[in-house]
């Protein structure tokens, strides 16, 4: 009878677990450690924090600026204000704003006015395009074509930055400073985070923390005993000196040693 009841309870437990997990039977390890591991959230490779574009851009583009193709037109400078407003970025397409950002970033690193193919200008145009596509990706996260192109562009810029770092490190640092980006190289060895390996590291860190707390407690205990030690030391040194003087022997303990012990005791009591 008892065995029958236990079998019924086991079956009901299995059925409840099966229903709770949506029709899937799961097996987990119940640990007694006071350590909880949560799988880290996967960050997309196109995210600014992963690509190194999370810093604020060094160039600013406002809606009242004249588009690139018309900002040097003499006829537009003499035109009425309402006509000038029609040629601002506010009334232009999004492509004109992107071109303006490209040109501003190019002007930060160009070697001369006709520089369009140097490594610095190439990286500047890539950075401007990456920032533009990241904004578009936030608006349209399901656009697969843009996401793939953005990922490939980030990896291409990362390769170019690695080459520039190997060729000329000072110029590499200067480009990073001008474009206000962070270089994140490809990892030498990529290891997927696993529960077992992460728990080992967390357990090791937990043990180190416990050991450090015990050492700090023991240190505090020893420092507390120093007050009694130096107080007894000063009293015993004074007693030895007094006894030696009373016996007519040259004292082996000086007054400076007694004063140093008393001073140390007073410092610890403060």
Image (cartoon, rainbow, N blue to C red):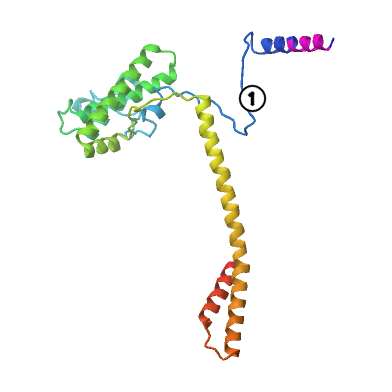
- Residue closest to the eye, 71 or 21: 21
- Residue closest to the eye, 87 or 219: 219
> Circle 1 — which element?
loop
Furthest toward the right, the residue is 1
* Magenta segment main secondary structure: helix
Q: Is residue 117 left or right of residue 15?
A: left
- Residue closest to the eye, 6 or 14: 6
Establish if 76 lies above or below 109. above
Q: Is residue 203 left or right of residue 2?
A: left
Tell me if I can see residue 78 in this picture. Answer: no
- Residue closest to the eye, 19 or 10: 10
Residue at 83% across, 12% down: 2
Residue at 59% across, 81% down: 240
The number of discs equals 1
Instruction: Say whether residue 223 is magenta.
Output: no
Residue 161 on image: x %, y % = 26, 30
Residue where numbered disc 1 is placed: 30
Residue 189 in which image quadrant: top left
Image quadrant holding the C terminus, namely bottom right
Residue 135 in which image quadrant: top left
Q: Please give the range of residues in magenta.
A: 2-10
Residue 239 on image: x %, y % = 61, 81
Image quadrant holding the N terminus, namely top right
Residue at 39% across, 25% down: 190
Residue 262 on image: x %, y % = 57, 75
Tell me if I can see residue 130 in this picture. Answer: yes
Establish if 69 lies above or below 257. above
Q: Is residue 214 left or right of residue 17?
A: left
**Mark 1, other Cα within 10 Å: few <14 / some 14–19 / many ≥20:** few
């Amino acid at each position: 009878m008892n065995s029958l009841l236990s079998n019924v309870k086991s079956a009901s437990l299995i059925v409840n677990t099966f229903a709770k997990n949506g029709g899937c039977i799961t097996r987990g390890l119940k640990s007694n450690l006071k350590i909880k591991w949560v799988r880290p959230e996967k960050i997309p490779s196109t995210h600014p924090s992963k690509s190194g574009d999370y810093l604020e851009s060094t160039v600013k583009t406002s809606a009242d600026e004249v588009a690139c193709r018309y900002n040097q037109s003499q006829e537009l400078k003499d035109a009425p204000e309402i006509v000038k407003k029609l040629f601002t970025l506010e009334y232009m397409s999004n492509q004109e704003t992107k071109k303006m950002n490209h040109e501003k970033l190019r002007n930060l690193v160009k070697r001369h006015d006709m520089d369009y193919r140097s490594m610095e200008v190439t990286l500047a145009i890539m950075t401007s395009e990456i920032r533009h596509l990241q904004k578009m990706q936030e608006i349209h996260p399901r656009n697969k074509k843009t996401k793939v192109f953005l990922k490939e562009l980030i990896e291409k810029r990362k390769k170019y930055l690695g080459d520039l770092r190997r060729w000329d490190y000072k110029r590499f640092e200067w480009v990073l400073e001008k474009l206000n980006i962070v270089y994140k190289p490809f990892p030498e060895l990529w290891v997927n985070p696993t529960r077992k390996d992460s728990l080992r590291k967390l357990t090791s860190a937990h043990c180190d923390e416990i050991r450090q707390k015990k050492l700090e407690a023991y240190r505090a205990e020893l420092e507390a005993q120093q007050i009694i030690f130096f107080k007894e030391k000063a009293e015993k040194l004074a007693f030895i000196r007094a006894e030696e003087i009373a016996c007519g022997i040259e004292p082996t303990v000086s007054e400076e040693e007694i004063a140093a012990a008393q001073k140390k005791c007073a410092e610890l009591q403060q």
